[in-house]
Amino acid sequence: MMAILFTLFAPIIGGFMYGIERVVKARMQSRIGPPLLQPFYDFVKLMEKRPMMVHSFHAFMGIVFFISTWFAMAVLMLGNDLLIAVFFHIISILALTIGAFSVRSSYSIMGAMRELIHLVSYEPVIILVVVAFYLVTGSFDYRMILSADTIPLLKLPLVFIALVGTIPMLLHKSPFDIAEAHQEIIGGPDIEYSGPFYEAVYTGRWIEYVYVFFLVFLFGGSNYFVGGLLVVFTFLLIMAIDNSTARLDYRKMLKFAWFILIPLAIVNIFFLALGGNS
Amino acid sequence: MSMRSKSPWILHYNTGGCNGCDIEILAALGPKYDIERFGMLNRGNPKQSDILLVTGPVTLKCKNVLRRLYLEMPEPKVVVAMGACTHGGGVFRHLYHVENGVNGIVPVDVWIPGCTPRIEAIIDGLIEGVEIWKGKTKEKEYLVGHGDDLLKKIGAIDD
Ligand code: SF4
């Protein structure tokens, strides 16, 4: 029951997280910042704009992005395993990039290419995280992980660090906001969306927040307090990093992911497998 | 309707001014004046913006770009012209390369006086623009005083 409610309200929870993010970010820059409900005001505003699309397939792909992100969330929550949810998330990103490739705007195409590089960077780490969960708890089902008697974080410290390193790539936060790159390619894959169609992409991004921070929460295991603390800590850390760094080159991102984060996660899993579950 | 007025996204375009105005806009985004309090964001993308904030005297090369940006914004939208340059050329008036202001190129809703305008004036002007924006609808607004051939040339007839 909780799972169904959580799935249904995922966009709203994500919207609140985005609102909190904007306020926290503003406070970090000693600004007052927008009201907490700002994402929902934006939502209503985008609804009232005149629908304008490049072509119908492009608009359709924006909506597919929203639906498939939500669907990935549903697969995650409603009892199928984590691994399949990760693959559904890949499908949602592919929908976005296919849409972005289908228009002639060079910014959009460049953004789509960079989005794929993002995917190549963070997705292996996410899959390794899921594998590590399997090694610790013996299941891909999040309910088993949440009722495991150990705290996965204690066995998977390096995997957790790797996951924290990938969150800026997943959520397009500052050192790795290469695909979105405001002031450079102005939103990347979302650039050609407008009005209600942009709304779909915008809301899809909120669901990604929930999806990512749910993965972080799983590291608390059955101890929900630790999970909650981890989420808050990671959230603030990501905001601080976002505010204090400048955008990097896509090669740096790829190198960081493949030469630092993936080896970190693999070393952790390796020792776990050697040490065994004894 | 009232919810809508809380999230105006701004497209800022400099049509060849001296950059004084642009720096003031950046200052308005900063901690002291922080226009994000009103939900305003500088999007830099015409397709997702609601307020076109123009500065500069419109050089001849910029003219069509400005028009195009205006047409790419989905309605409802407002145009806010900022600085003496946009009003009639300002210090660039009657030079060989300028249009003497944005009037007649895009329909302007709010004029912000000054060279450069104070940030308080910018915020006032933007709030005024939001008030006008509240009353607008999804109806298409076209360039006034131009024939069909121009609209066809920039692709505005059947977008
Ligand atoms: S109005 Fe004045 S400050 Fe603004 S761009 Fe023109 S000359 Fe510069």
Image (cartoon, grey):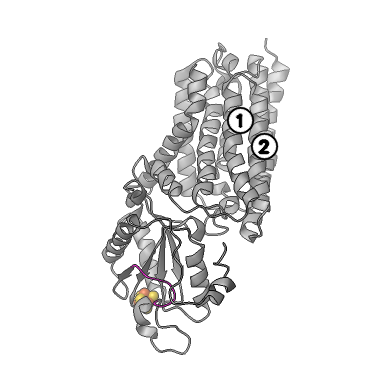
Task: Please give the range of residues in magenta.
Answer: B103-109
Chain letter for mark 2: A
Q: Which mark is residue A170?
A: none
Verify whether residue B105 appears in magenta: yes
Q: Which mark is residue A91?
A: 2
Q: Position of residue B90 (x, y in %)?
A: 35, 82
Residue A149 falls in image quadrant? top right
Label pair 1/2, CB-CB below 8 angstroms: yes
Whether discs 1 and 2 lie on one chain: the answer is yes
Inter-mark Cα distance, 1 to 2: 9 Å
Chain letter for mark 1: A
Task: Tell whether A205 sits left or right of B95.
Answer: right
Q: Position of residue B157 (x, y in %)?
A: 55, 67
Residue kind at label 1, given as amino acid type: Ala
Above or below, A150 relative to A182: above
Q: Position of residue B134 (x, y in %)?
A: 33, 55
Verify whether residue B1 appears in magenta: no
**Nearer-N-terminus badge (1/2):** 1
Alpha-carbon neighbours of circle 2 within 10 Å: few (<14), some, or many (≥20)?
Answer: some
Kindly identify the residue that appears in the image at 48 percent across and 77 percent down: B146
> Which residue corresponds to mark 1?
A72
Above or below, A140 relative to A261: above
Main SS of the magenta segment? loop
Residue kind at label 2, given as amino acid type: Ile
Q: State the residue in front, B119 or A41.
A: A41
Instruction: State which image quarter holds ligand 1.
Output: bottom left
Q: Position of residue B112 (x, y in %)?
A: 30, 70
